[in-house]
Image (tube, helix red, strand yellow):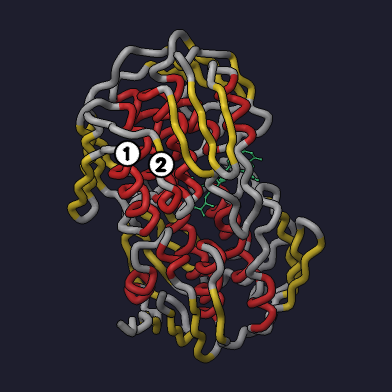
Amino acid sequence: MGSLHINGGKPLVGEVSIQGSKNGALPLLTATVLIQGKTVLHNCPGITDINAMAELLKSIGCIVTMDKNTITIDATHICDTHCPQKQVQAMRSSIMLLGPLLGRCKSVRMSRPGGCVIGARPTDIHEMALRQMNVRFEEEEDTIFAYTDSLIGADILLPFPSVGATENVIMAAVLAQGSTRLRNAAREPEIVLLCEFLRKAGARIRGIGGSELEIEGVKKLREVTMTVMPDRIVAGTYLLAAAATRGQVLLKHAPPHQMHSLIHLLRTMGAEVFADDDMIYIDAEEATGAVSYIKTGVYPGFPTDLQSMLLSVLAVAYGESVVEEAIFEDRFKVVEPLQRMGAQLSTEGRKVRISGVAKLRGAQLRACELRGGAALVIAALAADGESVIEGCHFIDRGYENIARDLRCLGADISRRDDVRIR
Ligand code: EPZ
């Protein structure tokens, strides 16, 4: 499992390159199932969720080879549409195989991906939308069985712009009979990347980047090579780490055009931020201001995935802040450990009220989910003294090597993996 050991209390200074996007690469990997041939994906992040998805694709008959950050998937011979429980339950994003397997094989059987500590994470929107495309669902215990004699395009209005449901509908629609109109679609950059990937493979999609998509079904898709975009949440993590430590940091291969809400917020806190097409420079020496009120939202709003990390930054800002989490119902797990580090914050329903303190103190900490774990790292970097963060396998789900990246920024951080007693 492993733990991170951090001596905090000094500004981060340096430059770091940003890895490929986890939430961009995962749907592309599921979309390869739609292609009866080879797909090559460059700049995939070396993270455990990607490895788990690769294993899941292999379990249904794909030939998957990984060479550093390039993954080649040959989906010519998909032999099984029963996704094994172990891999499916390893991560939420396995649900995004629904659309592609229905599109390619007309059926899929998988255990329900389950919720996680940030919320129940139901799949009712996915199922409601796919039912309108002539898909039937049966459920036995915790297994979903979905099947269709043929996918038929439909006019679908999502009750909420769910990222995963949008991705599933797009991937089901590209090989469906007729056209699909998808309204109130999610607009995250990861959706745009998926649409660009599918268009490159011959899909017919209009309205890319907007909340209304028109998809005309085609007979077959062709082989594709694609490069995954940089990870905007990892980039945001390191900007927030710079802010918490009042440092000066340069991000290379970053996606500033996807990060306007965070960059604007950091400027209102007093940071100086400069950006051009693929780099971001932050001087956070004066980033001490509190944020009277911020609410997470769907893109292009403030990302829910950066909410916990923002709490770590506001814990040492000068003044009172209020953060409201509008996307997930249980995403304040980081409040208690921050309190143990000396932070003054309290929850009121979907809001957290924070009174900034001069300094946090290092502590024994334990990550229990991915982005909350990153928030504890940021708090430990800002805190005086040593912190130990157990459970860094949660962080490995989304960060290639957070210790390596932060050492590029001068952090005193090391990783100790549990010695496996054989
Ligand atoms: C994606 O999850 C991301 N994961 C999440 O990132 C991200 O937080 C989330 O989008 C929101 O931006 C991947 O892309 C792999 P949703 P997803 O469907 O698709 C509710 C990370 O840390 N909902 O937009 O699961 C749901 O419960 C992860 O990288 C339903 O009620 O998010 C939640 O409250 C965490 N019914 C809200 O919608 C449904 O059928 C947003 O969920 C589907 C969703």
> Label 1, label 2: how many angstroms apart (C-alpha)?
7 Å
Q: Residue 157 location, x and y as percent? A: 64, 22
Q: Quadrant of ligand 1?
A: top right
Q: Residue 71 location, x and y as percent? A: 23, 46
Let me know if residue 321 appears in the view. Answer: yes
Q: Residue 260 location, x and y as percent? A: 53, 47
Q: Quick one: which residue is furthest to the top in this view?
A: 178
Q: Vertical placement of 417 versus 280: above or below?
A: below
Q: In the image, what residue occupies the spot 45% across and 16% down?
A: 215
Q: Quick one: which residue is furthest to the front in this view?
A: 140
Q: Secondary structure at mark 1?
A: loop
Q: Secondary structure at mark 2?
A: strand
| Residue for badge 2 | 83
| Residue for badge 1 | 60
Q: Nearer the viewer, residue 384 or 114?
A: 114
Q: Are marks 1 and 2 in contact (CB under 8 Å)?
A: yes
Q: Residues within 10 Å of mark 1 (few under 14, many from 20)?
A: some
Query: Hey, which quadrant is residue 408 in on the image?
Result: bottom left
- The residue under label 1 is which amino acid type? Ile
Q: In the image, what residue occupies the spot 74% across and 57% down?
A: 293
